[in-house]
Image (cartoon, rainbow, N blue to C red):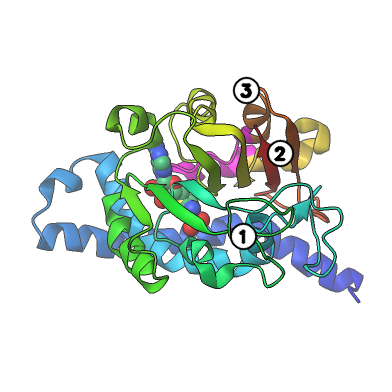
Amino acid sequence: MATPLSRTKEALASLLFPWRFMLISLTFLPSTLLTLLRTRDFHSLFSWPLLQAAWFGRFWSWAGPQVRLSAEELVVPLLEGRVVAGKVLPSTNLSSARVPGVGGTVLEIGPGSGNWVSIFSDRYLSPSSTSTESGTTPGTRAKVTRVYGVEPNPAQHPQLRAKIAEAGLGDVYEIVPVGIEDLASSGRVAPESVDCIVSVLCLCSIPEPRKNIAELYGYLKPGGRWFVYEHVKRPLDEGWVMSLYQGFVNLLWPHLIGGCDLRRDTAQWLKKAGPWSEVDLVHPENTPWYHTVPHTIGILTK
Ligand SMILES: C[S@@+](CC[C@H](N)C(=O)[O-])C[C@H]1O[C@@H](n2cnc3c(N)ncnc32)[C@H](O)[C@@H]1O
């Protein structure tokens, strides 16, 4: 049972978390610079976006697995269709599950170093799932037949490739090495051709988010599902102190964390991306007031 003292400690740790995270990120800068110098990659050394990508790639190879550890109790059930109104349903009682989990053809946005790739493997098929077709039973996952991982940062591709091989998805998972803003011109994915979009902690980093989120909507088939776990802006009406504090942290955060923006209204932009037949997108259950990086979680169905 949480005591007032333990709750105060937890709140303090949470408020200080962004500063700790940024400090750790900074420690990866010297080794990034040295590697670029050693490999004579002067092009990246003197271009801020390229240097930032190389730096973030190194940092995320450390941070990504930590983030997965803290988020997997939500993200794994989310991808199984077992998160409803921000709550995780037990796999033994799926009566209130509304849509099937991830399956069929999937577009994964910004997979980074491949933290979530293993979930697309058959090893993660729900024990209760009897379906072999894409997305038929609410709250259960079906076979993933194709994944397009849209990841523009080449610094993350070697690890991403390793995770794909580890998950046995070599014939299923294709890396599309562009930003989503260039996905249409890449010609790799046709409009209205994917069953599912998966975005985990990446819409904070894409350019022109409102426009590009709406464009991504166009890749979903009618009936397709968008699985979302993203961090979002703290609105003023949820408490001005935390909103102000988040704004203050965000003065520095994007420069040290690979261009990530803490102040995006991603949930609203997703809801307005196009007509949805069902929208379930909220803060996870029990999100405390002191989270500087609060999340939105859920599934939108076209
Ligand atoms: C915070 S990382 C998250 C990576 C991964 N989803 C995870 O949870 O570990 C954000 C990712 O978004 C990617 N990203 C940045 N700009 C992008 C763009 N324009 N299109 C697609 N992905 C992008 C970054 O390269 C990075 O891998």
Residue 99: where, in percent of width, then height? 73, 47
Quadrant location, the C terminus: top right
Residue 206: where, in percent of width, then height? 45, 36
Compared to residue 70, the image places residue 186 above or below, namely: above
Q: Does label 3 or label 2 sit earlier along the sequence?
A: 2
Dot 2: what SS?
A: loop
Q: Does label 1 or label 2 sit earlier along the sequence?
A: 1
**Looking at the image, which is closer to me, 195 or 183?**
195
Task: For label 3, count other residues whose C-alpha is less than 10 Å away and answer few (under 14), some (14-19) or many (20+).
Answer: some
Type of residue at label 3? Answer: Gly
Q: Does label 1 or label 3 sit earlier along the sequence?
A: 1
Compared to residue 270, the image places residue 99 above or below, namely: below
Identify the residue position indicated by label 1 in the image: 17
Label 3 – label 2 distance at C-alpha: 24 Å
- Is 69 left or right of 207, judged from the image as shown? right
Q: Nearer the viewer, mark 3 or mark 2?
A: 3
Residue 140 appears in view: yes
Task: For label 2, count other residues whose C-alpha is less than 10 Å away and answer few (under 14), some (14-19) or many (20+).
Answer: many
- Is 84 left or right of 166, judged from the image as shown? right
Dominant secondary structure (helix, strand or loop) of the stretch shown in magenta: loop
Numbered range of the magenta stretch? 247-266
Identify the residue position indicated by label 2 in the image: 234
Identify the residue position indicated by label 3 in the image: 274
